[in-house]
Image (cartoon, grey):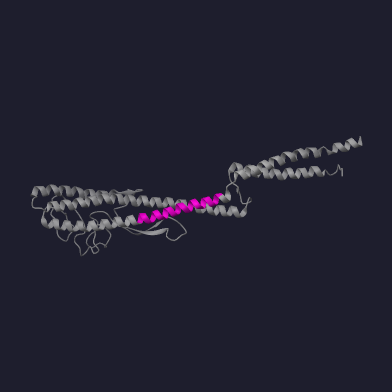
Amino acid sequence: MMSINTNVLAATSQNVVRQNARITEKGIERLTSGVRVNSASDNTAHFAMASRMEAYSRSQAQSSRNANDAISMLQTISATGLKIQDIVFRLGELTLQADTDTMTPSDRAALNVEAFGLLNEWASLANNTRWNGKAMMAQNWADDEFNIGTDAAGLSFSLILRDWRPATNEPSATADISVNGAANPAANPYYNLTLVTADENGTANMIAGDNILHAADRTRMAAKLALSFSGIASELSRIGAYISKIEFAERSFTDDARLSETSRSKIRDANYAEEVTRYSRSQIISETATALLAQSNNSSQTVMALLS
């Protein structure tokens, strides 16, 4: 039917052009952003899923960074601990060397000066080793909580680290707070290593200047060093166990973040082959509909031709 009051063909063409314009606009948005689900209106369920996965992925990535920071901190302590262990080894050698009767008093005095310097260096390393501005070896860490993740068991753990200073505890101090301490410091005089001066005599059962000048003092020094050998080895083993545990946790965080990001990408990111095909189709339809709209608007000219 030919009608001039209602141009059905033009109305139909206009509707197609309007719908296709929305499709084209959405296609341009996806192609320029690379994202299929740009807002909740695109796909409510997928938008919520992608948001949750992104939040989880970012939290796991941060947990991985936290774990790496903890590993770096413990490695700093371990590296300095190995240097202190070498000092203790050398102190043991000097004590044994001074114990032989081939040494003259002046020889022992020379060895004692070296021992004095090594013990001061031990104290310096323990007092000045820092990580992120915090003294790491000049304090006792008793059950400090380290949090490297969220919302899962095993991501928070207690960290026990002993004081590495050679002269840390009085005989009445709490047991097991120093690497060179015994289980019962009050009952064990061989607890601290202190060189006040290079030639000061040691005193039994007291915190005093240790030396390797005299036989009795060498005996006390050897006993104290034996505690240090044991305590340092135990502490380094503990730190190594912490590092191993955190390394496994860090790998888990990294894998979780990667897999979550992969899943989010499959849900949210645009498939360019599909989007380009859809965009090309909408372009063709748009051009065709526009041409037909122009043609339908000319239908009134046919009526005028009939009337004339």
Query: Is residue 248 on the magenta stretch?
Result: yes
Q: In this view, does 249 lie to the left or right of 219?
A: right
Question: What residue is shown at x 70% (from left), y 44% (from top)?
Answer: 20
Question: What residue is shown at x 68% (from left), y 45% (from top)?
Answer: 23
Q: In this view, does 64 lie to the left or right of 128?
A: right
Q: In this view, does 132 lie to the left or right of 42?
A: left
Q: Where is residue 267 in the image (x, y as percent from the top left)?
A: 58, 51
**Magenta stretch: helix, strand or loop mostly:** helix
Q: Is residue 195 something one can see in this rendering?
A: no
Q: In this view, does 154 lie to the left or right of 198?
A: right
**Closer to us: 112 or 230:** 230
Q: Position of residue 214 (x, y in %)?
A: 11, 54
Quarter of the image for the C terminus: give it: top right
Question: What residue is shown at x 43% (from left), y 51% (from top)?
Answer: 64
Question: What residue is shown at x 51% (from left), y 53% (from top)?
Answer: 260
Q: Where is residue 147 in the image (x, y as percent from the top left)?
A: 41, 56
Q: In which quarter of the image is residue 4?
A: top right
Query: Is residue 245 on the magenta stretch?
Result: yes
**Closer to us: 29 or 129:** 29
Q: What residue span does the magenta drawing correspond to?
A: 242-265
Q: Is residue 46 something one can see in this rendering?
A: yes
Q: Quadrant of residue 279?
A: top right
